[in-house]
Amino acid sequence: MLPAVARARECRLPPGFTCIFPGGTPLSSSRSQRLGRIAACTALALSAGTLLSAAPAVAADKPAAASDSTTPSQSKLRQGVAAAKGEAAPGKSAFVGSGGKARLDIDGDGQSDWLFRNVTGYGGVSLSNGGDGEYTFWNDRNETVKDIIAVGNVRGSQAPEILQLAANGRLTLHQANATGTAAPSWTGQGWQIYNRVIGAGDLTKDGRPDLLARTPSGDLYLYKGTGAQSGEPFAGRVKVGSGWGVYDQILGTNDLDADGIADLVAKDPNGHLYYYKGTGSASAPFKARAWVGGGWNAYNKIVGIDDVDGDGRAELVGITHSGEVYLYVGKGLGKFHPRYLIGSGAVNDEIMVGQGITPVYGKHGVYGVDESNSAYGHFNQTNGKFAPNRYNSGNWNSFPANGKLVNAAGLDPMNWGHKLSLDGSSLTNLTLNQKMSGDYTNTDLVVGPGDLTGDGNGDLLTRDIWGNLYLKAGWNNGVDFWAPTWIGPYWNTYKAIVGAGDINGDGRTDIIGHDWNGHLYIHPGTGNAKAPFGERQWIGGGWNGYSAIAAPGDINGDGRADLVARDWNGNLYGYTATGWGGTHTFSARHWIDANWNIYKSFN
């Protein structure tokens, strides 16, 4: 089921911010004090109760809450199932076979429910029995998890369980209750070695849900469910395949063909969708792939929603880049009825639990400083654009006159870009209002692209005035770093270096360099602290037609980090990552907005 129209309202802001919702009602103080450094769930923020004119974006009379988007309710989903199958009235699900057991049945009615987290950090639930509202993920006051994975009933209790994956590789198992997840019953470490962790359903036909995980090199591992009520919920990993790096979306669908064994679908960057039929074998869990169809790049997210109509065959949902939501009713063996539109306006959700992507972690927008040294932020949506209104306030509203703006990704556990100021020999974290460790004398550039060392913590790159580039590995507290590691000389060939996570789709953090001759290059990340980048690849020329470039993170919700560029007339364009490299790194540009030349710098 999909999030219903009415949702509880919440915002998460840094200290000093105030959230105002349509109608001018402030959020309750207990919720506004949450530690997330994010704007209202509308993705539109207000400062001290005053709506900012949306320059360069066009101002709305009132902010429209993301919770008011027209995503469909459970009843709409059932109507869609009936319409897609040509039936007169929607039925009620009665799951068939162990492979078809609902993985996320929170309300206990035998049907999977829907969990989501939007781009501002708001968690919500939509229950198949009609309940809908806020959902709190354990410890989210102190940490914003990178991914949320529905695995099913792992411990054998009445309630389902989900996995919460932290950016630093900590994986925790939680019972999913009606309004939130309980404290973890199990914790595992080191899972940052994978770029996808997938709740697969029961692949081995023993009635226990299993787990899949893929490495950046494309190896696929199975973690078989143990069924243990305490201790280890999954057995040791078994390699079950290689070459899975060709896919940019992989999702566990549960049972697609009513044989009692869970199946899998995967999409490649060309938009081809493939079906992997489950075998029930732990050593070889899938048969050879079967082609489902092309054109699936129309969706930034494909979501497995289990069996909705009770025939034992699971359904899929596809969400387009512009927010339309389409239902695909399963016919078996990887075939589906023609798609049916069941909703629109879904441009604010970062995580739909069951989706085929892993979200980009650490940065969700850009920040600009105007000629009066006032700083503003623009939050990403998932439609290739930013939310309609910029915001200011907090510790960094008045930006230091001599400071250089840096927007650093993932420096602490809260999954938000930190606003830094490089001023002389010091670097200040304005988000935390603290000086950062280290000496920055003779430093002319600081970049915060995310985790470069493979430990899950956000790092910094610094360049000195002689062109030497250094890596400063982060401690995950926003201010402290290990001693710098020298990467190499001649990095002053670039007038700009930017990055905000994984661009080429392998799960490792990459950076982009813009040289003085207008050429753009990608430096693919390796995850190795001593040699963090592979050989650079040429993207293209002519980039001196832009006065500035920036890396906002993922602006179209497909799990890859993107690029924005401002031309000399103030027009802002988006370049979304394709999952390829070289000259195919980014798709053709699309216009985002005008008047961005009001900023003397943005990052």
Image: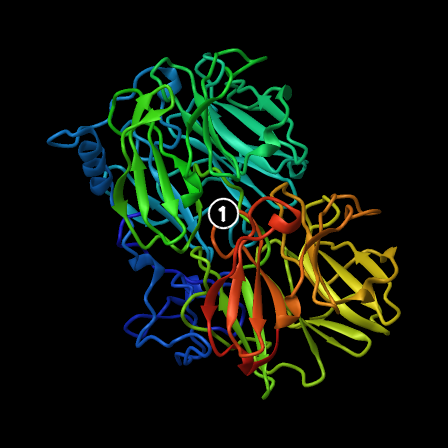
Image check: 491 left or right of 206? right
What kind of element bears circle 1? loop
Give the left or right position of residue 311, taking residue 560 as reference: left
Question: Residue 383 placed where, x, y %?
Answer: 42, 56
Query: In the picture shown, does residue 13 fall above or below 156?
Result: below
Residue identified by numbered label 1: 558
At horizontal 54% and vertical 38% (from top left) the residue drawn is: 248
Q: x%, y% of residue 419?
A: 63, 69
Q: Residue furthest left?
A: 88
Please state which amino acid type lies under the numbered disc 1. Asp
Task: Give me the residue at 57% from left, 36% from top.
Answer: 196
Q: Nearer the viewer, residue 146 or 108?
A: 146
Q: Is residue 116 above or below residue 119?
A: above
- Report the front residue among 157 and 194: 194
Q: Among all residues in the image, which is located at the extreme bottom?
A: 372
Q: Quadrant of the C terminus?
A: bottom right
Position of the N terminus, as image quadrant, is top left
